[in-house]
Image: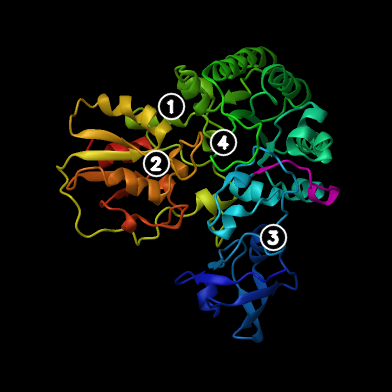
Amino acid sequence: MSAPRVTAVAYGSVAQRFGLRPGDELLAVNGCVPKDVIEYQQLVDEPELSLDLRRDGVVLELEVLKRAGEPLGAQVDSALFDRVQTCDNHCEFCFIYQLPPGLRPSLYLKDDDYRLSFLYGNFTTLTRFTEADLERVVTERLSPLNVSIHATDPDVRAAMLRNRRGATSLRWLRALLDHGIEIHGQVVVCPDVNDGEVLEDTLAGVTDEYPELASVCVVPLGVSRHTSEPRLRPHTKAEAIEVVEAVHDWQKINRQMLGRRLVFAADEYYLLAGIEFPDPEAYEGFPMHEDGVGMATTLKMEFMGQAKSATGTRPGFFAWVEGAPAEGYRAPRSDGSTAISLRPRKSAPVGVVTGGYGAAVLAPLLRSLGRDDVRVVPVENRFFGGTTAVAGLLVGEDIAHALANQPEGHRYLLPDVCLSQGMFLDGTRPDDLPRPVEVVPSDGIALRRALGG
């Protein structure tokens, strides 16, 4: 177990007043060694703190007095201080197995840790979940959690996870629901594996066995050109239509039985099937927005002025905890180093940079403006290849290739979802691109504002 290290101390905070410094390692708080940022937050909420810390190799004790619940004002360097619960499944559709070599080491980490589900919205299969984990989740009300279901048939699920515990681990899902924990489920559909009759059986199983689930999203597998799995293939249009129709059928059944739709299809399915997106009301508050369910609809609402604020990420632990580090897609998109001093004039023509799916959604919205100075600049994802067409997986190398063929002197808007802490997945930055870009939040309100609307 590594000690949490202080990375920043807020000006005027309790931590600064009592002498805590960046670089200090917190060995214990009131005699307790926190295992993760969840426990750390609970400990530092106390009004009287005894901090055992190590500074420049010297162990010190710091006594802190504050109001109960008053923020300490110290940011720590990681979410988990003990060992992350890694994933021991070997799913053939796992996108981590489909990554090319040479990326940042953190991108290859497969976790199956319920704490990261609570903190960041990661999905867990529960195959490494234990009685002790259940006790902690229930006692501390670590809710909501996201659970990968994939199939309710035990044999199919075990085969998909390539883990025999996949056949039995959904018992933990039942236990969590019995204790009132909010759970969002996910079904990744793979052609010839868990589609067709298996998908119908899964949606029936979800309705019969886990009706308390907050929502279930049905998403297509992603296929990279780097996959080594012979069975993996993308959906055909006919298969996508079949999935969407199955979801719609079960939405009708669930509305009759449960009073709500429960299950939703990802936007990718509607694009693959060539079916119009449902009305906003059909998404029932967009509970799975972060997982690509209803993103196109909320973008349109925001762009057309039908929403007062951007949908954004679902509020969770890091929406309120102080001093918690951001990770992955929740990390700050820009680190402030992407500013370019010489930008094209505001009256210059505009190219909106996005992936293949984004281009399909944005093109009609931009046409609705009736302007001939605004266009979509679609970027082919050659880095990952295969079916990868979401903007969030665009890399600098492919964006640079697309922009190199675009005219100079135009404005180019880049969605911030491409970046994490100012960096693309391939390690390049916006400053490395051949044309100046303006990084814009990935919502319709920000895009409309950037276009001068």
Instruction: Specify which label sits upstream in the sequence, 3 or 2.
Output: 3
Image x and y of residue 121, in percent: 60, 44
What residue is shown with label 4?
223
> Which residue does the image show at 78% across and 33% down from the upper left?
159
Marking on residue 39: 3
Q: For marks 4 and 3, give the one nearer the viewer.
A: 4
Dot 4 or dot 2, earlier in sequence: 4
Query: Relative to 436, is 362 on the left or the right?
Result: right
- Give the magenta part as a residue range: 123-133
Label 3's element? helix
- The residue carrying mark 1 is 297
Q: Look at mark 2 in the image and give the residue it sits on.
A: 442
Q: Viewer-proximal residue, 336 or 392? A: 392
Q: Compute the Cα span from label 1 to label 4.
A: 25 Å
Q: Does dot 4 land on a helix, a strand or a loop?
A: loop
The alpha-carbon separation of the residues under discs 3 and 2 comes to 32 Å
Q: How far, Cα to Cα, is label 4 from label 3?
A: 38 Å
Which secondary structure, mark 1? helix
